[in-house]
Image (cartoon, helix red, strand yellow):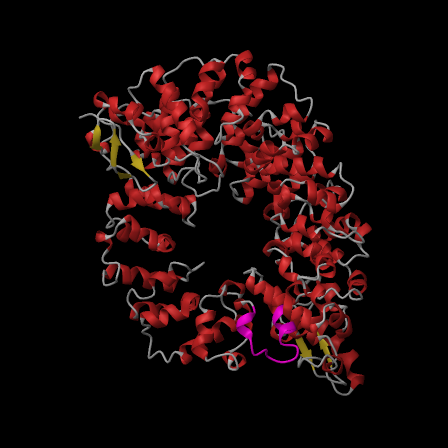
Amino acid sequence: MPCGVVVVGECGWQVAAATSAGTYLCSSSAVNESAVCASVKSLPDRFVCYLSPLAVSNLSRDEALSLAQRISKNCPLNVTHRGITGERAPSSPRREELQVASSLVRKFEHFPPAVLRALGQAAVGLSISDIENGISDEDLEASIPVLGEVRGWNAEQSSTIINKLLSSGYQILDGQSLAKLGSLVAGLNSSTLQSLAPEVILEAIKLPEFVQQMVTLPSALKMTFVEKISSSVDHPADLVKYIPDALASYIPKSLLVFGEEKPNIQDLNSKMWTQEQAAVFFSDVIKTEPDFSRLSQSVLQGFTCAAANEMEAERFQELAKVMKKKNVKLGGEQLSCLVKMVTLRGIPKDLDNYPKDLLLFLSPSDYAVTGGCRQYFTKIGKANLDVLQRESSQRKELLLEALACLKIPGTQVNEEDAEILGRLVCDLGGEYIRSSGGTLLKQLSQCESLLPDQEEAIRSVISSGNTTFGPPVAWSAFTLNELSGLIPVFDHSILQKIPRNALTLWLKNFAHESPLSREQLATIVEELLPSRHKRADGCPPDKKITETVLNDDLMPTYYTPEELRACLKNVSLENHLSQILTYAFTTQQLAVLKRILDETYPDGYPASLLPKLGPLVSFIAPEVISKWKITSVDMLAALLKNQPPNDQASAVIKRYLGLGNALNAPALDAIGTRYVCLLNAAELNMIDPSSLKKTSLNPSACSQMTKDILYAKAKRAFSDQHYLPAYYELIEPYLGGAPAVDLRALSKDNVNMTVSTLAKLRRDSLMSLTPSDVQKLMGTNLHDLVKWQNKSPIREWVQTQKQSELDKLHIGLTGGTQEGYINIVTPKFQPPSSAPLGAVAMTFHLLPALLISFLMTLVLS
């Protein structure tokens, strides 16, 4: 008996569909197009949400409209991921939902308002051609209320609809006409939004149904919305109150300095902030809030040492315990400060009441009053070990102490001990992994990174098949899901043994939630590509690329590069490009896509294509990029979003600026910390300080020239806030370009500079600071100098100081100059000598002092 295919959930399980005519067990292999499905009409409403595309392929137009209405009414859209890259796209339809929508839409050639209204959510299946050719200008404007309620538009769809609307005369005159666009607002470009009066924006964001659309907007649009809103609001408290939740993280830090104004705790708690934002207003918050338990996790993550130093010990301990209850995630430097403050009067007996990550900066002996070493390492195993650097002495010492505590004999770790070690397993060498068989695989799959020796050991253990997971040939999709973090470690010899259906099912149902990049997923696609046969002319009949295929993020697994080239010849690639480029195509397949575009546009890519290129930008020569029409910040952001190599990124930025575009805040945000170091002096000098005030950059890894220029601009940008505690949080990323005089001024403000920031200061500025200056700058963090005293440039700074002055710090620093001695540190430039002094500081113990001048002249001559 014919039946509709009912697919439940993302796992693709087939279930029995209960209908008025009886119960039918449907499977995709049992259904052919001629047999589909009189019973679709009689399916209960709860099952129409899980229909497969085949189940609706033979419906009439009226049946398609009826089914679309039932789907819109009964099927809440799942919040999921779009594309195989795992990139978050809230309120996006699942692959099957898109395919069903496309199948329903294909029943029509023209889309008057009545049809679009009946299609409802299924209108998300409209192709670019449908929008451009199947809807008249009048019908499109009349259908705005319907289309604005559709969720899950991709970038091409929404921008095509908006551009068609605006070109046909649609005007955004007030907040109502803007809000009327609904989900289509993502199709606006920044310049159009920038041209609107701030009052229009303020009116629109008062409407709850419009605010819901903010979540899916691209970053450039979010920044523009924030800029328009902030230009009409005079006080930080009002800005926090009015800004939609989805835009809060885009508020520039400088606009969140409350100063004399009292922050509204309830408004702050209702938003999600970045750690940098929260650090700016954290001091203001704890001064005005008596009950720390009222503070949200997002606000508490802004903890700073400077704010903590102004608190009484009891209040501070209360704050730290609230952080534990709220499970606040803190960085390494925050935790380092926190532990100093918590243990200021000795080790508390109730350490378990403090954040567990705090224990990473203590030892089993510190924990002895609270519990034994086994309990200590059980907690350490669950802590965020990545707050400590991988090769740091602290992590190495923790591992050695853990192995001693657990009395692990040799290099074999049993399952119970592996569970206790937790994340510390990530630091075990290859010999432990081999000796322990598969015992460590579960923990190793959670590691952020692995060393070559560890990877080789993992491959050896898995290849042996002697693990609880069994040999790769017996793995299922669920096995792969448990080991997903190790997939990048698998080589061809392992991947080829895993059943194809297991790999396919994992890609279909679990890849979205995995931490793997598109490039890493492409290694699996490589294994799933069809067997290569002798090249045939044309596209195989069963490989025709349809709308259903284009909406399928498993598309890369269906075609060899040769087949992909043949089968894409008759497809309008531009209309689907940005969608399919989220799929895990292999390098060879991506090269095919680029070649097809080159053949389609022999005279150069049109401007409309550029924002859709995604990962293909990495394949394009810089000299070609230098001819593109990069005319908007939206285009700049789209081209840099996929993080192309520096050569391509630099060409994109230079072309954008070469066409006369401004290096304003949205452009700086698009360039970001990743690429700001690529800017030359002329380009850096184009930055207006007011623009720098509206963005967040960290040029600490850039050249000294870049740091010097940006520091001067940042100092001007934040000059009106230099008297406030938040000033240091604003200027800190730029201090690598600060002269010594400015650092000495900061030393008077209780800034509690971290040692990592100190080490990134301008070398000449650092060397001119006295021990007293450094003590005032670092405050609570001063003891960290000892851990860095053998690292450059702290080592060189210590060697240029008098040991008697270092002794006054009372932290145990050694290596300074004794009385009657002088240290000469090799300059960074090449000395004028036939025998260079080298990179290491050379110390001359010269007695008596009368010989110093003579010997210095002799050495440097």
Image height of 51 relative to 778, above or below: above
Image vertical order of residue 279 relative to residue 560, above or below: below
Q: Nearer the viewer, residue 740 or 73?
A: 73
Give the quadrant of residue 796.
Answer: bottom right
Q: With respect to residue 495, does 155 lie above or below?
A: above
Any magenta on residue 343?
Answer: yes
Residue 756 in sight in this render = yes
**Residue 431 image position (x, y, % from top left):** 33, 70
Q: Residue 837: tell me if it is visible.
A: no
Q: Residue furthest front?
A: 20
Front-most of 249 and 428? 249
Point out the stretch of residues depicted in magenta. Answer: 338-354
Q: Quadrant of residue 859?
A: bottom right
- Residue 304 located within the stretch drawn in magenta: no
Q: Quadrant of the N terminus?
A: top left
For residue 511, what is the image quadrant?
Answer: top left
Q: Nearer the viewer, residue 647 or 448?
A: 448
Left or right? Give the position of 295 relative to 71: right
Q: Position of residue 781 (x, y in %)?
A: 67, 70
Number of disc labels: 0
Q: Position of residue 241 (x, y in %)?
A: 69, 43
Q: Which quadrant holds the C terminus?
A: bottom right
Residue 743 lies left or right of residue 842; in this view the side is: right
The single residue placed furthest to the left in the displayed view is: 1
Percent position (x, y) of residue 719? 81, 51
Residue at the (43%, 31%) spot, across then down: 594
